[in-house]
Image: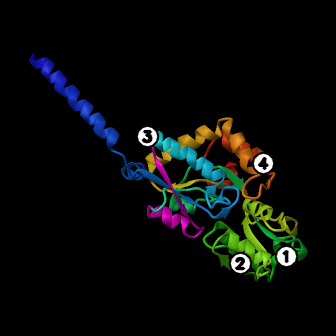
Amino acid sequence: MRKDLFLALTLATLLSGQATAMADELTGTLAKVKELGYITIGHREASVPFSYFDDKRQPVGFAIDICAKIVDAVKRELKLDKLEVRYQLVTASARIPLLANGTIDLECGNTTNNAERQQQVWYTNTHFLTASRFVSKVESKISSISDLKGKTIVSPAGSTNIKQALEFNSRLNLGMRIIPAQDQAEAFLMVETDRAVAFVQDDIVLAGLIANAKDPKAYVISEDAFSKPEPYGIMLRKDDTAFKAVADAATASLYQSPEIAALYDKWFTQPIPPKSVNLDIPMSPAMKRAFAKPTDSPDPSTY
């Protein structure tokens, strides 16, 4: 064999090997998923209609469906024939620690994306906009935040909502007794059983809980809000650039396609499990703009 041909073939072999090695140099979540053969989704118990159990105790919801699109994208990225999906129930206080320690790979629910949390975790593109309000019984005749003065209220531990309630309590000197609940279901039950007069939470979550209550007409959501419109996002591990790129591409593709309108209607304007209630919440103009130009910004003024 001629010397120059031998050198050319040798170089081609080395370059091919180097390219293969580079392709195999996965990091973070992608490397973990490929090695283990499964991805773990963190979900909520009663965050209707984003992430909750149906009557068969299976995780369902708008955020769960979005995460399924991310899982499909991961499967394609890793060139896998199959990818097992495992589910892990999380609470408001445990979701970030479970993501950070590797127990879950995606947190699929109604988690607010804010600058403080972005110091611990990352988010993919915004999938909903909400505001923090309170639910109370109609018979309580509580219509404003000032009406809560001296009253007992409840909000999930570790949530943005309880921090906002504490801030209002201090700034306005309301003298509220603020009780941390384990989750939304427990918090709503406290209002239902008169252990608290109000439950502070994202308005869309409150709408879902009311729709599934024994007597939906017995409850009312406040017009007063503890916050400006806030974005929800699927949580990812911080500094995992490669995994975030896959998630961002998958969500942007979904949000900018006609499919997002059908998916939104499925959960917000049509009967949903387990009781076939209809939340009847059409897509807002702000949400339409956010889907048209996907962003992971935590700044409410972006929207």
Q: Residue at 68% across / 69% down in the picture?
A: 184
Q: Nearer the viewer, mark 1 or mark 4?
A: 4
Q: Nearer the viewer, mark 1 or mark 3?
A: 3
Quarter occupied by the N terminus: top left
- Label 3 crowd bin: few (<14), some (14–19), many (20+), radius 10 Å: few
First along the sequence among labels 3 and 4: 3
Vertical relation: 129 (above or below) 170? above
Q: Residue at 57% across / 47% down in the picture?
A: 68
Q: Which residue is mark 3?
A: 81
Q: Which residue is mark 1?
A: 147
The question of residue 81 being in magenta is answered with: yes
Left or right side of 259 for 77: left
Under circle 1, the secondary element is helix
Question: What kind of residue is marked 3?
Answer: Asp
First along the sequence among labels 1 and 3: 3
Under circle 4, the secondary element is loop
Asked if labels 3 and 1 touch by Cβ distance under 8 angstroms, the answer is no
First along the sequence among labels 4 and 2: 2
Q: Position of residue 167 (x, y in %)?
A: 69, 73
Q: Nearer the viewer, mark 4 or mark 2?
A: 4
Question: What kind of residue is marked 2?
Answer: Ser
Question: What kind of residue is marked 4?
Answer: Gln
Vertical relation: 80 (above or below) 196? above
- Label 2 crowd bin: few (<14), some (14–19), many (20+), radius 10 Å: few
Give 221 or 69, whichever is nearer the viewer.
Answer: 69
Q: CA distance from mark 1 to mark 2?
A: 15 Å
